[in-house]
Image (cartoon, rainbow, N blue to C red):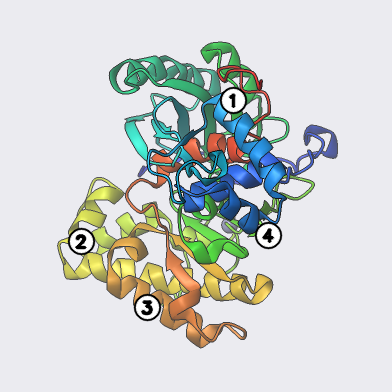
Amino acid sequence: MTSLPAPIRRSRPLRRSEIPPPGHARRASGTGSVLGAILDHGPVARSTVARLTGLSPASVTGHVGHLLSRGLVRESAEATGPRGLGRPHVPVDIDTSRFLVAGAHIAVAHSTVSLMDLRGRIVAEDRRPHAGTDPRHILGDLAARLPLLTDAHAAGRQVLALGVATGHRVDPAAGVVVEHPHLGWRAVPVREILAAATGLPVHVDSHSRALARAEQMFGEASTRRSTVLLFVGAVVDGAYATSGELHRGPRSGAGSVAHLPLGSGGSGDAEPCRCGRTGCLQSEVSERAMIRRAAEQSLYVGTFQELLDHAMAGEPRAVALFRRRARLVGRAAALLLDMFDPECLVVVEPGAGRLPECLADLREEVGMRSWVCDDPERAVVPSSFTGSVLATAGGAVALGALYTDPLGPWPALPAVS
Ligand SMILES: [Zn+2]
């Protein structure tokens, strides 16, 4: 992760014709709302699901019937009410015994394939470095690794779909990575390539949107109403969701905060950015810059992970670098909080996720800089998936689609009776 490919500034802006037409964001169907309530509260009685969703008891019974016939939910062994009064009193829960989804995350230097159950729990994951950045090669490698993972870990459960997540601009409606400058990808038809290679339905989205959706499905409850997620890795980007809807934008570009100008970081030595300017958020907090700054202090590491390991072991120079990074991320977080005033801002950054002093610094910076956020302790939270962020992102794309439309085109599921 220390060497970056050469091309920096985009040779030319994308033409409108190169951007796939926007798809419509899909709201959860009635059946999707019922499945979501069962995910949140299961085992749960149908009558409670009716109260939670605002649907009529008869309608909930119908939706639950469809979900039972598809094997997505099961009736729970223990009944909550008196026996003999009929099925509505038998609680239902998510059935995790029959199906899995597969996930693939494509990072700048490596890719991760994973298996996830219907409650969003990682069953298995496999991360490997890229041999190059050619999309056909990377996608072919992912497709080849998936059956090995399934054979070893699926334990008889069937894989429903493959979700793919990566950074920069991704169009989920078209299934296309619109532009990924770090990889040199432009208009790569990921869904088409991987569907042909795996035979699975394939869903594609940006890793930030995938992780925001994962928080709403399986993570922090306070993210439900509105959330901004800031992803800080080799790529820096974000996502915004409100009332369960992820805002993607007509150019699939929402959340492109990599080049937010931060100035010098207070130290007078602004970091040159791939875009040709200096002091952009992504360049200031980049893993490459962290490794370089460590070397300037005679702390020599080969990879960013090594630097993180040093920080977690308490090495003072490494800790200081992560605390500096947390301050810079805090500046961007304050701006995003002022822009969107979300219920919750989720920071996906390994320092803030693991080192309490980094999270404290980040929150303090937000408290000093934000005009609207007066409760950073509550509003700014680390990712619920620290340690398994990349394995979670891909699977969450597939599960997000399943929970939105469980009666949709899922060939592996039995037809609705
Ligand atoms: Zn820049």
Q: CA distance from mark 3 to mark 2?
A: 16 Å
Regarding mark 2 in the picture, which secondary structure is present there?
helix
> Which of 304/263 is in front?
304
Q: Earlier in the sequence, mark 1 or mark 3?
A: 1
Q: CA distance from mark 3 to mark 4?
A: 30 Å
Nearest to viewer (mark 1 / mark 4) = 4
User: Could you classify mark 3 by the number of other residues whose Cα lies within 10 Å: few (under 14), some (14-19), or many (20 or more)?
Assistant: many
Regarding mark 4 in the picture, which secondary structure is present there?
loop
Q: Quadrant of residue 349?
A: bottom left
User: Could you classify mark 2 by the number of other residues whose Cα lies within 10 Å: few (under 14), some (14-19), or many (20 or more)?
Assistant: some
- Residue type, label 2: Met
- Residue type, label 4: Ser
State the residue position of label 1. Answer: 202
Q: Report if the CB atoms under discs 2 and 1 are less than 8 Å apart.
A: no
User: Could you classify mark 1 by the number of other residues whose Cα lies within 10 Å: few (under 14), some (14-19), or many (20 or more)?
Assistant: many
Residue 54, relative to residue 72: is it above or below?
A: below
State the residue position of label 3. Answer: 361
Q: CA distance from mark 4 to mark 2?
A: 36 Å
Q: Earlier in the sequence, mark 2 or mark 1?
A: 1
Residue 258, relative to residue 110: is it above or below?
A: below
Residue at x 39%, y 15% (from the top left corner):
147
- Residue type, label 1: Val
